[in-house]
Image (cartoon, helix red, strand yellow):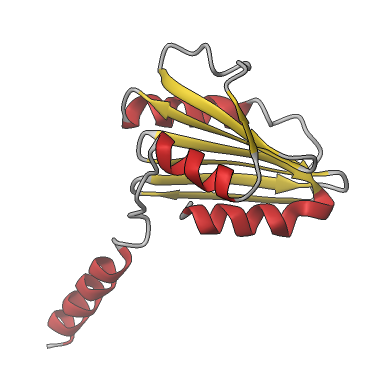
Amino acid sequence: MKKIFYLIFISLIILTLSGCGNKTELTQEDFKNYALNNNLSLDNTGNLYSENANVVSFINAYNDSIAFTFYICSNNEAAKYMFKDIKSNEDGIEKNKEMYTNLFNYNKYSYSNDNMYYSIIRVGKTLLMTNTSSQNEENAKNIIKELGY
């Protein structure tokens, strides 16, 4: 009887937690609209990752204190690969706080130090990079939360 109870209990936990990482990816239009409605400037000036063959489109959104880059990749696997590549490029930087989350269709890596806050988030085939000063960390986190990432 105990085995059956534990089996049911564990099954319920798994079913409950399996939806935790199930976030919905934004479209480029959603991201643009959010940026424009929140007084962020937009451009599509290239960067190190924008020339990646897996990138279908990208857009930068920024103001004087914060910068975002939103990428749409060709598929989930391409986005996972790009996420790992970008994350590995941050290995040599001094960090005071570091966080990594890996769920079903969601990966998040972020860190902060005395000068900056940085994050890279993957939802499905999209990526959102954030870079700001440490003083604007909470503002960046609020925007990321509003975007559903």
Q: Nearer the viewer, residue 64 or 21?
A: 64
Q: In which quarter of the image is residue 123?
A: top left
Residue depicted at x 23% and y 79%: 9
Q: Which residue is outermost to the bottom? A: 1
Q: Where is residue 134 in the image (x, y as percent from the top left)?
A: 81, 50
Residue 149 located left or right of residue 56: right
Residue 120 located left or right of residue 71: right
Q: Which of 88 and 23 is in front in this view?
A: 23
Q: Where is residue 122 in the image (x, y as percent from the top left)?
A: 46, 40
Q: Which of 70 and 23 is in front in this view?
A: 70
Q: Where is residue 89 in the image (x, y as percent from the top left)?
A: 65, 25
Q: In which quarter of the image is residue 79?
A: top left
The N terminus, quarter of image? bottom left
Residue depicted at x 38% and y 38%: 27
Residue depicted at x 43% and y 11%: 53
Residue 101 located left or right of residue 66: left
Determine whether 60 is above or below 100 in the image: above
